[in-house]
Amino acid sequence: MSEAENNKGKMPGNNQILGRYAIVLALLSLVIIGIVFFTFKVAFKEKGQWEKLEQGLQKPSTQINAARGNIYSAEGKLMATNVPYYYLYIDFKAEGFNVDTFLNSKTNGIDSLSHYLSKKLKDRTPAGYKAHLKAGLKSKSREFEVSKKRVTYLDLKDISRFPYFRRGRNRSGFYTKEIVSRQKLFGSLASRTIGDIRTEFYDGYSKGRHGLELQYDSLLRGETGLRTLVKVGTGWTNVILEDPVSGYDIHTTIDIQIQDFTEKALSDKLKEIDAESGTAVIMDVHTGEIKAISNLTRIRSGVYAEIKNHAIADEIEPGSTFKVASMMVALEDKVCSPDEIVDTGNGVYTYMRNNIVDHNANKGGYHQITVAQSIWYSSNIGVAKVILRGYGQDPQKFVDGLSRIGLEEDLKIEIPGAGRAKIRKPGDRQWSKTTLPWMSFGYEVQIPPIYTLAFFNAIANDGKMIRPIFVKEICEDGKTVERFTTEVIRSAICSRETLDLIKDMLVNVVEKGTGSPVHSDVVSIAGKTGTSQIAVGGGFQSHNVSFCGYFPAEKPQYTGIVVVRRPRIGYPSGGTMSGGVFKTIAEKVYSHQVKLDIRTIDNDSAKVEIPEVKNGDTKSLKFVLNELNIKTKLDQISTDYVLGEQNNNALEVKELNVQKGLVPRVIGMGAKDAVYLLENSGLRVNFSGKGKVISQSIAPGQRVTKGQTVLIVLKD
C-alpha cells in the first residue's frame, strides 16, 4: 500500500492546525481593529454629526413641577390646596403646522377658531381674534400668546376641542403652560397665618411668601421631575426621565369652627367702631395649640382683610394687661399683699414732674383702694406706687422678676416675621427716671400680642408656660412624618400662693372691675382689660384697647387675646370693645362644645330611621353608625373604604377596593375622602360644588398618570 493511501483519512498535522489558527486570529484581529477604528471615528471624528442627529430625535429636558403639599385644619379639613390654571399659546413653526390650512375657512381654520375663542373667553370680538391670530402668524412666533386670560382645566378641555386646535399639538401648534394657583377653601379664615405662595416659579418650585407656606416651604413644595420629547416615527412621545416627588402635607392646629366664630366676632366689632385693625387669638390652655387666629386691617370703609399678622409681628405697648405681670412679680417678692391699702388720690399722681393719671380722674379718682383692687379697677397709680415702693431703689430687681416669670423667653414662633418681647433695663440708653413706674402699667415695653397670650395662658395652666404652636403634624401620603407636641418653657412662673392670688384678681376684674362688660351668664370668664395710648410725633393719638383672659374661669380650657387698634367710634375701652369680642367668642365656643344626651330628647315625629350616608372611610362610618346604634355588616368589611346603599329602610355596605396604580372610584364620597384618595394615588385634584361627588373626569380603574389633574363635581 502506498504512503498516500496510508495517510488518507488521518487528522491533519500540527503545522496545518497552527496555520488555521493563525488565519482565524488574523481575521479576528481585523474585526477588532475595525471596531476600534469605527469607535474612534464615531466618538471623535463624527461626534458632532451624531450629536446633531440625537438632538433632532430628542427635545431638551424640561422640569415637571411637583404637586405642592396641602394644608389642613386640626380636624382634617382641607384649607389650602393646588388648583392648576393654563395659559394658551400657538407655535407657528410647529413641524406639522400648515399655513394654508390655518387660513382656509373651509377647513375650520382661523375664522371658526376666532368665533369659538371670542365666545368662550369674551375678551375679544371674532374679528379681533382673527386679526390677533394673523399678527401671530406673521411674526412666526413659537410662543404666541392666544389670550392674556388663564383658563381652568374644564375650560381647557373645551378649548382643546375647538376648530383647528383639535388637530393636535404638532399640526395646530396649540399648547399650554400650566401655573398652579394656591386656593384657600375657607376664604379669609386664618389667611395670613396659612400664608400665600408666589405666582411665579423659581427652579420649578412654587415659593411660599409668608405664614406657614413660607415657614414650611421646603417641605410643602416637593421635588421637581424631568421629562423630554423623543421622536418616534413621525411623531413625538413624552418621556418621563425622573418622576416629581409631591410635597408633604401640613396639619395645623386651627379649628375651623372656632376660627369662624373668632373672625366673625372680630370683624363685626371692627366695623361697628370703625377701627383701623384688630387681632384675636384663641389658644388651647393645656396643649399650646392655636385654635384660631384672625388679623384684620381696614382696606376701605367697612371692608377688612388680612394683610399683616399683627398677633405675631406687632411689638406694641400692651397697656394695662401688663399690670398683671407687675403684680405677680411684686407678690412673689413679698413687697405687697392683696389687702394692703394704696392711696390713689383724686386720680392724678405727679412723679418726677410727670403726671400718672387713672382713667377715672375726671370723676375724682379711686382714693384709697386695696392692692388687689388696683388690678380690678386697672389703676395706673395704684400699681405704680406698689412697684415704686418695692423697687424704686433697685429697679433691676423688678426687671429680673419679669424675666423670672418668663416674659422675655423666646417663644420660637413658627411664623416668619415674628416679633420678640423687649423689656428695658437699667443702664440702657432708653432707661430714664420715669421708666420704672410707666413700665409697671404697660408703657416703655414692647410685647407682641402672642407673648401676652402665652403669659396669661401660663396663669390658666396652673403656672406652666408652654410654647404656642400652629402645626400638629407633617404627613407624607397620609402617614405622619413628624408630630409636634407640647413644649414646656417654664414649669412654674411663680409660686402656687401667688398664682392663686392672681387668678382671684382676674376673676374679680370681670365680676367687679373694668372687665364687667365681659361677664357672661353662659360661661365664666377671667382676664384683664388693657388700654394704651399710641405715641405719634411726641404726642399721643388714639389708642390700642385689649382684653386677655381665659374660660371657663374655674377650669380653663381656652385662653384668648383681643387687641383693637385706633377705634374711631365710641370711647376707647378694653372691656366693651376688645372684651365684647372676647365674650362673644367664649360664649359661642363654649355653647358649641356643650354635649347633650340625645337619649333625654323626645323623638321627632319626622325622624329618619336610616340616615343617608356617604361612601368613604370605613372606620369613620363604623364610628358614626355605632353611635347611632344602627346595625350593619361593617365588621365583616376588610377594606379601608366602603360603599353604602339604602335598601328597604336598611343600610347595606359593600367593600370598595382601591388598587395601587389605578384611579379609585370616589363617586358618592365627601370632598375629604375623595381628595385624599385621588391625591394619594398621585393625581392632582380640582373640584367644584359641595356635598357628595357626583362625577369624576377620569373614570375609575384607569391607570394613573402621576401629576394628571382630575376634576370632581360635588352636589348636595
Image (tube, helix red, strand yellow):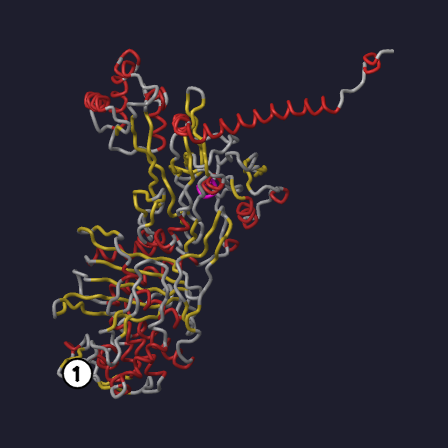
Q: Is residue 212 magenta?
A: no
The reply, left or right, for residue 197 in relation to residue 542 is right
Query: Residue 289 is drawn in which quadrant?
Result: bottom left
Label 1: few (<14), some or many (≥20) within 10 Å? Answer: many
At which x and y percent is residue 428? 23, 78
Magenta span dominant secondary structure: helix
* Residue 465 showing in the rendered view: yes
Give the residue at x 32% y 65%.
Answer: 450
At which x and y percent is residue 316? 24, 67
Instruction: Give the secondary structure at mark 1.
Output: strand
- The residue at which mark 1 appears reads as 349
**Quadrant assignment for the N terminus:** top right
Give the residue at x 47% y 50%.
Answer: 475
Q: Is residue 671 magenta?
A: yes
Outermost right residue: 1
At which x and y percent is residue 523? 38, 65
* Residue 126 showing in the rendered view: no
Total residue callouts: 1
Highlighted magenta segment, given as a residue range:
670-674
Q: What residue type is disc 1 on?
A: Tyr
Query: Residue 324 is drawn in which quadrant?
Result: bottom left
Give the residue at x 53% y 31%.
Answer: 701
Vertical side of 408 occupied by 227: above or below: above
**Quadrant assignment for the C terminus:** top left
